[in-house]
Image (tube, coloured by chain):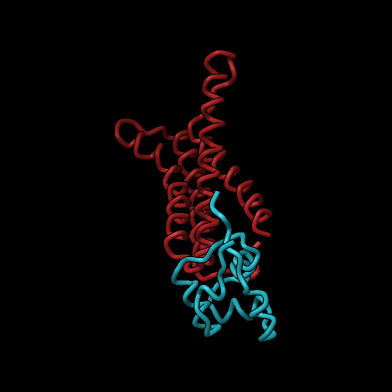
Chain colours: A cyan, B red
Amino acid sequence: MEIPLKNRLRVLRAERAWSQADLAARLEVSRQSVNAIETGKYDPSLPLAFRIARLFEAPIEAIFLQD
Amino acid sequence: MYRNWSKAMKRYQARVAAAMVGYIGVLVAVDWTFRNMPPEGPLKYALAVLPALPIIGVLMAMGAYVIEETDEFQKAQTVERIIIATGATLAITTGWGFLENFAGLMHMQLYFVAVIWFAMFGLANIWTAWRYR
């Protein structure tokens, strides 16, 4: 089993007072996707990770953390 | 399960609905033909295989959905469901085959394999929805 990525999506979302649905709409993905990524059940593809990073104006490694 | 259906999901549902309506129509027509004016020669085979086409259509609609879905998570979930359904169907039908051979279980018609697959796909939907809840 590979080590699941941790992420700061929930914190970043809270800072902007966005719901999962708000973030999903901005990323043009389903709310289920945001939830699955946020809870670490699904790792986004590289293109989606870049879209998330651009949206939060932060480098990918500041959002997705290993170990 | 999907509160906001994607365009690909709506297209999939429309295609499946069309295929199911077509299936019922074709099945009734073919059944009636074989009962009342049984065809002969090549026509017999051509007519007999017709009810399979809408079912193949459903499978193709699934393939099209996986290609057309832009939400990568939904796509990945669907692929996972297809793999689970395929594995479960192979397991059931392989077991059934040996039970038929050695234990005299009743013969399973091959078209029933698709029925089992769709049932397993339905169960896989419940499983993945629970897992990614």
Nearer to me, A48 or B116? A48
Q: Quadrant of residue A16?
A: bottom right
Nearer to me, B10 or B1? B1
Q: Residue at x 46, y 59 (%)?
A: B66
Residue farthest left in this picture: B42
Nearer to me, B67 or B7? B67
Count of numbered tags: 0
Residue farthest front in this picture: A67
Q: Does B104 sit above or below residue A37?
A: above
Q: Position of residue B92 (x, y in %)?
A: 56, 31
Q: Quadrant of the C terminus of chain B?
A: bottom right
Left or right for A46, reference B125: left
Nearer to me, A13 or B87? A13
Q: Does B33 sit above or below residue A8?
A: above
Q: Quadrant of the N terminus of chain B?
A: bottom right
Q: Residue at x 59, y 61 (%)?
A: A67
Q: Position of residue B17 (x, y in %)?
A: 54, 58
Q: Residue at x 53, y 48 (%)?
A: B24
Q: Position of residue B106 (x, y in %)?
A: 58, 21
Q: Does B116 sit above or below residue A49?
A: above
Q: Position of residue B112 (x, y in %)?
A: 53, 35
Q: Residue at x 62, y 74 (%)?
A: A9
Q: Does B129 sit above or below residue A59?
A: above
